[in-house]
Image (tube, rainbow, N blue to C red):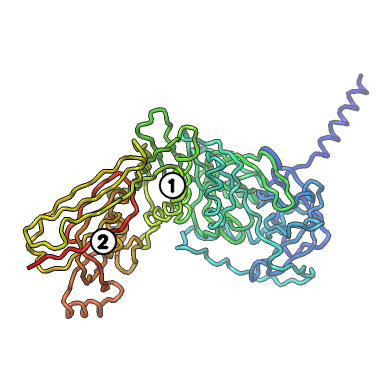
């Protein structure tokens, strides 16, 4: 019996000794101390939460491969598990240890179809630079990385063309989106540099969208970590790997995510469900958890953040008046000029098209309300004849939302965005069959009738009659009666929906200009006069005397502009709540 216990004890000791131990607080290995043939191990999560090592062998150093003084370590992936699938999207930032010292982090994919798999590693010294940069938000471009001299040539350079390597793509996964919606918006995300994998999940919901952990568990090198762009009922996060930990200071990825420079992005927990191997691009599939901190740097050599610091985000609500059984959506989005409008539109698309309970087949109205700090809400209403019409107009919707949210005057973000989606009692589209003016010539004081014949969708013909008594001040004018949509009339009257920066001087003027646009539903019946407008910001002055015009334009030609347009003398919106596509014009002469 004693001999048996002794044998078991020895076996237990042997087992403990052969289990790998994850390096914690490892010393740093200088780049110049690396030699070809050195063997190392890379720590990353293959499944779940616990990191595991895989083996690599140093091939060489690519000097200045990423810019002046920015080298890349090239390693062969000798571990059979990784050799078969190559570097995996989501392994970004996995730390490389050689002889117990931290040398660099996995960051670059080398080719895709080679017979022997290689990967590029960012030297740890370059990553540490990121954590020392000031957390001041750059205007729109990243600050150049400081250059450090590194001209040791003991290792022969390895020649690789620029097209043969690229940063490992973070495994961006979405939660709360149907595959149809994810596929619909994938090209627009791709244009922003976000490769979206529709297969993913999220542990956060509208009941606790932030899921902030007051005292988050300390992360370890090799742990999985996520950069969340949206959390809640709609989630979007890029999964990567923790590279280096110093207390609550976290470095990850080993390459840029969106090249935002100094920024403010949520740091979230995550778990790896599995790895999908591929000859083209293997990827980790993950579930995103709650927010545990914030990243403040997105630089060439990696991203940096701190545990426990919760970033400010923009809350978004989607409600369904009239549908008591339909649950509202709530999510929060990062404050970023290009990302915010796209993710907000994605959540709206999910509400319209991605649920068993949607069924807006007859048509629906979307009312968008945007709250800005210290300003009255801005509201936009848009009718759609059904989900297909919304699908076709989604690009325009993202553009309009960007116009609202991305102003060129101040870095102001909304404090809240709300959508209200309401069914229309019937399909809101219609067709105009005729437009009649009771007379083409009238005297001041006489009455003119305008008759608009129209037909609702699959309905019987109807007519709208509008009367007008000609004002005395119109005497002697050659006028035009126009029937058009609100946006078309805005263009005809010189009120372009593309707001020229030179015509405005402040954020408040910009918001005021957005409020001045005519409604997008129904039609506008207007009596117009050809005129020469002088524009001062958004103020329109018809027929300004030539002497004053010359003085104004010589003072500021960008601000004061002259345009020949149609000026409305009278207008009226008719048939609201319907969608039309028409521009009809009729002459009207007013006698003396």
Residue 264 percent location from the top left of the image: 49, 52
Left or right: where 170 falls relative to 553: right
* Residue at position x 30%, y 67% in the image: 503
Q: On the image, numbered disc 1 is attached to which residue? A: 389
Residue 145 percent location from the top left of the image: 57, 66
Front disc: 1 or 2: 2
Q: In the orientation shown, which residue stands out farthest toward the right? A: 3
Nearer to us in this view, 215 or 387: 387
Q: Quadrant of residue 359?
A: top left
Q: Residues within 10 Å of mark 2 (few under 14, many from 20)?
A: some
Nearer to us in this view, 290 or 570: 570
Image quadrant where one finds the N terminus: top right
Q: Residues within 10 Å of mark 1 (few under 14, many from 20)?
A: few
Q: Is residue 135 visible?
A: yes
* Residue at position x 39%, y 52% in the image: 413
Residue 411 percent location from the top left of the image: 39, 58
Residue 378 percent location from the top left of the image: 31, 50
164 w.r.t. 462: above or below: below
Q: Is mark 1 in CB contact (under 8 Å) with mark 2?
A: no
Nearer to us in this view, 31 or 484: 484
Q: In the orientation shown, which residue stands out farthest toward the top? A: 1
Name which of mark 1 and mark 2 comes first in the sequence: 1
Q: On the image, numbered disc 2 is attached to which residue? A: 585
Image quadrant where one finds the C terminus: bottom left
Q: Could you tell me how far apart the alpha carbons at marks 1 and 2 are, in whole angstroms?
A: 27 Å
* Residue at position x 47%, y 62% in the image: 138
Q: Secondary structure at mark 2?
A: strand
* Residue at position x 42%, y 42% in the image: 386
Nearer to us in this view, 391 or 326: 391
């Amino acid at each position: 019996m004693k001999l048996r216990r002794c044998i078991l004890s020895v076996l237990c000791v042997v087992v403990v000794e052969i289990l790998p131990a994850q390096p914690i607080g490892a010393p740093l290995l200088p780049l110049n101390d690396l030699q070809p043939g050195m063997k190392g191990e890379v720590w990353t999560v293959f499944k779940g939460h616990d990191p595991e090592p895989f083996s690599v062998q140093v091939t060489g150093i690519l000097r200045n491969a990423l810019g002046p003084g920015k080298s890349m370590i090239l390693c062969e992936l000798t571990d059979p598990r990784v050799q078969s699938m190559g570097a995996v999207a989501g392994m970004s930032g996995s730390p490389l240890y050689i002889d117990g010292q931290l040398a660099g982090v996995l960051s670059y994919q080398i080719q895709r179809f080679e017979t022997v798999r290689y990967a590029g590693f960012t030297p740890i010294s370059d990553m540490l630079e990121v954590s020392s940069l000031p957390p001041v938000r750059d205007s729109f471009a990243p600050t150049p990385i400081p250059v450090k001299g590194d001209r040791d040539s003991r290792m022969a350079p390895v020649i690789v063309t620029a097209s043969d390597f690229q940063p490992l793509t973070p495994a961006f996964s979405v939660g709360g989106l149907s595959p149809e919606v994810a596929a619909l918006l994938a090209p627009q995300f791709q244009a922003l540099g976000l490769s979206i994998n529709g297969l993913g999940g999220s542990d956060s919901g509208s009941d606790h969208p932030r899921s902030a952990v007051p005292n988050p568990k300390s992360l370890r090198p090799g742990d999985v970590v996520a950069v969340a762009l949206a959390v809640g009922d709609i989630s979007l996060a890029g999964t990567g790997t923790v590279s280096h930990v110093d207390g609550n200071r976290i470095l990850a990825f080993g390459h840029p995510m969106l090249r935002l420079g100094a920024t403010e992005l949520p740091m979230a927990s995550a778990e790896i469900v599995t790895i999908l191997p591929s000859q083209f691009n293997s990827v980790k599939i993950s579930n995103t958890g709650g927010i545990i901190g914030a990243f403040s740097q997105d630089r060439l050599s990696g991203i940096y953040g701190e545990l426990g610091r919760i970033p400010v985000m923009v809350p978004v609500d989607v409600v369904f008046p009239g549908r008591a059984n339909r649950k509202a959506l709530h999510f929060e989005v990062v404050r970023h000029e290009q990302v915010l409008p796209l993710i907000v539109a994605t959540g709206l698309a999910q509400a319209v098209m991605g649920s068993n309970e949607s069924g807006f087949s007859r048509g629906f109205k979307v009312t968008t309300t945007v709250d800005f700090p210290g300003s009255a809400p801005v509201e936009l209403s848009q009718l759609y004849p059904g989900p297909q019409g919304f699908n076709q107009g989604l690009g325009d919707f993202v553009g309009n939302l960007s116009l609202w949210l991305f102003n060129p005057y101040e870095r102001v973000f909304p404090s809240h965005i709300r959508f209200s989606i309401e069914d229309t009692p019937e399909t809101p589209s219609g067709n105009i069959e005729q437009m009649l003016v009771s007379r083409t010539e009238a005297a001041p004081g006489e009455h003119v009738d305008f008759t608009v014949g129209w037909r609702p969708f699959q309905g019987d013909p109807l007519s709208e009659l509008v009367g007008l008594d000609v004002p005395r001040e119109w005497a002697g004018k050659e006028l035009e009666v126009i029937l058009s949509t609100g946006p078309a009339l805005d263009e005809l009257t010189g009120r372009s929906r593309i707001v020229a920066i030179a015509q405005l001087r402040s954020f408040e003027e910009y918001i005021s200009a957005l409020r001045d646009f005519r409604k997008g539903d129904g039609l506008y019946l207007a009596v117009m006069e050809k005129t020469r407008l002088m524009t001062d910001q958004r103020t329109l002055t018809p027929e300004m005397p030539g002497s004053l015009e010359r003085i104004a334009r010589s003072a500021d030609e960008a601000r004061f502009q002259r345009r020949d347009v149609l000026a409305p003398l009278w207008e009226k919106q008719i048939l609201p709540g319907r969608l039309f596509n028409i521009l009809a014009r009729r002459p009207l002469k007013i006698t003396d």
